[in-house]
Image: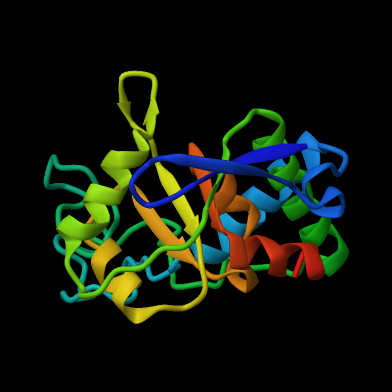
Amino acid sequence: MEANIYNIKGEKIGSIDLPKDVFEAKINIPLMHEITTWQMACMRQGTHAAKTRAEVSGSGRKPWKQKGTGRARAGSIRSPLWRHGGVIFAKKPRDFSYAMPKKKVRLALLSSLSAKAKDGNIMVLDEIKIEEPKTKLMASILKNLKLTAGNRPAKVLIVSKHDRTLLVSSRNIPALKVMDVSDLNTYDILNSDRLIFTKESLERAGRSPGA
């Protein structure tokens, strides 16, 4: 399987063979779904909190006597049936993350990369050089590459070595994410329309598939 190589001006300058171990793995859709669900669960903050009737402020005294008033019986103004009362089965902070076998995570990663390669959504850049941290410089590179998904700009994931100038130039572009090969994961790959590897990152991915 091949991918085209472009420069930052958007000019095609050649093609390159994608590493078979990484981009021609078996595509396992149920596994990718499982790992994506797991990643989304791990990303949940779990900081939601509501007060039960024992925690809201207010007197615990019985508002009025049980009988003879003509009103419904009531035992406390903190009852969940009352305004400003507590919450029934109130949600409390919790950790939504759970363990996942490393082998599954790795196979799902290879599966997602192979799916993108099969659909022709992988590009290779010769190199990315940005002299100063400016958003417009990164935006011009994306414009030169003419990245679209239907009638909208494509969501792009750039896989490049850690470079502060590149990160700062990219962080204000909503549909763009930049990460190192070692940080690649199934969720971010599937959440992107196009994957752009630098030649250096592609070589590293081939040396350590699934790393």
Tell me if residue 81 can be seen: no
Q: In the displayed image of the protein, which residue is found farthest to the front?
A: 13
Q: Is residue 173 left or right of residue 98?
A: left
* Percent x, y of residue 194: 50, 40
* Percent x, y of residue 48: 37, 65
Dividing the picture into quadrants, the one containing residue 154 is top left
Q: Is residue 7 above or below residue 84?
A: above
Determine the residue positioned at 63% across, 59% down. 185
* Percent x, y of residue 208: 80, 70
Dividing the picture into quadrants, the one containing residue 51 is bottom left
Front one among 86 and 62: 86
Q: Is residue 52 left or right of residue 127?
A: left
Determine the residue positioned at 83% across, 42% down. 24
Front one among 16 and 63: 16
Determine the residue positioned at 25% across, 74% down. 131
Q: Is residue 3 above or below residue 21?
A: above
* Percent x, y of residue 63: 15, 63
